[in-house]
Image (cartoon, helix red, strand yellow):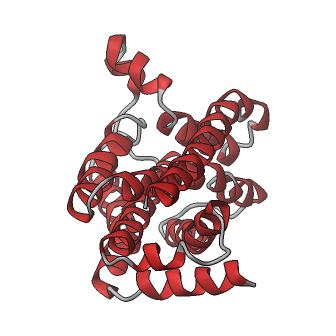
């Protein structure tokens, strides 16, 4: 019950800034519309809607890190968390309370993204539901990264790192805008060490119905998700003891 109450309070804090929510949820949609319009105006099928949508959906998750970092760092600086540390809540309770609304928001954002893609010409199929479900593991990655930034850094630094830096990393190292094979070399190797391109590739595999191709990428994403979630809990627990 206390986790749900805290999650409800977190939700209210996140939606308190409607412009941030509108930008976070709306910007990926704007990109999807823009790139689809560009694709129609060029002779080459550069931004095919079937391959573009999973990438944009994953990119949209990067804004969840910003929301997580912002609410946690703000709670720390306002001493709200310090007062809550005197309650029976554990570090896991706090992490779940912060994460649950953002994970639900991630799924909603993904659904909206695919609905817009359908309007733009994406064919409805059972594979689409698999692709949406596969947004959950990378959502854990972005939310955990935001929680870690919010736990360790000031509000300004946390939002800057999880906002501008992380969204750019997710954009350029995930193969959304271009095929990483065209660049190759060190850039491609670095991209495939990180989880972003794996999250996009498994979404593309799901959309194409090539389910066996999901798993090499899914293991990478799940590995990052587990490690970062555990790290977020450990760091938050240490912060609780330090405060």
Residue at image coords 51%, 67%: 113
- Residue 115 position in % (x across, y down): 56, 72
Q: Quadrant of residue 173?
A: top left
Q: Nearer the viewer, residue 194 or 212?
A: 194
Which quarter of the picture shows residue 178? top left
Quarter of the figure with the C terminus: bottom left
Q: Residue furthest top?
A: 185
Q: Is residue 127 above or below residue 80?
A: above
Residue 89 x %, y %: 65, 72
Q: How many marks?
A: 0
Q: Is residue 50 visible?
A: no
**Does residue 104 show up?**
yes
In percent of width and height, residue 123 lies at 64, 61
Instruction: Looking at the picture, tell me which residue is in the foreground, 158 or 47.
Output: 158
Give the left or right position of residue 25, taking residue 133 as reference. left
Q: Position of residue 15 (x, y in %)?
A: 42, 86
Q: Nearer the viewer, residue 225 or 216?
A: 225
Question: Is residue 30 shown left or right of residue 122?
Answer: left
- At a point 53% along the width and 86% down the height, the residue shown is 9
User: Toward which corner of the image does residue 111 lie, by quadrant?
Assistant: bottom right
136, above or below 82, in the image: above
In the picture provided, is 240 more to the left or to the right than 25?
A: right
**Residue at screen point 74% across, 54% down:** 130
Residue found at x 71% / y 35%: 214
- Front residue of this view, candidates 116 and 147: 147
Q: Quadrant of the N terminus?
A: bottom right
């Amino acid at each position: 019950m206390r986790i749900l109450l805290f999650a409800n309070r977190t939700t209210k804090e996140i939606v308190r800034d409607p412009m941030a929510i509108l930008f976070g949820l709306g910007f990926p949609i704007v990109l999807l519309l823009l790139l689809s319009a560009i694709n129609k105006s060029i002779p080459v099928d550069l931004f095919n809607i079937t391959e573009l949508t999973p990438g944009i959906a994953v990119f949209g998750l990067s804004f969840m890190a910003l929301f997580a970092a912002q609410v946690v760092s703000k709670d720390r600086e306002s001493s709200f968390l310090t007062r809550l540390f005197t309650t029976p809540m554990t570090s896991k309770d706090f992490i779940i309370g912060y994460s649950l609304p953002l994970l639900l928001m991630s799924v909603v954002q993904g659904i909206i993204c695919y609905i817009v893609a359908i309007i733009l010409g994406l064919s409805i199929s059972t594979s689409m539901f698999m692709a949406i479900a596969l947004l959950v593991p990378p959502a854990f990655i972005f939310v955990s990264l935001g929680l870690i930034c919010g736990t360790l850094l000031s509000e300004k630094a946390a939002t800057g790192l999880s906002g501008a830096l992380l969204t750019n990393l997710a954009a350029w190292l995930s193969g959304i805008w271009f095929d990483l094979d065209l660049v190759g070399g060190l850039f491609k190797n670095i991209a495939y060490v990180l989880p972003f391109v794996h999250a996009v590739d498994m979404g593309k595999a799901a959309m194409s119905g090539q389910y066996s191709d999901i798993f090499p990428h899914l293991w990478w994403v799940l590995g990052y998700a587990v490690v970062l979630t555990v790290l977020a809990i450990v760091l938050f627990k240490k912060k609780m003891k330090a405060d």
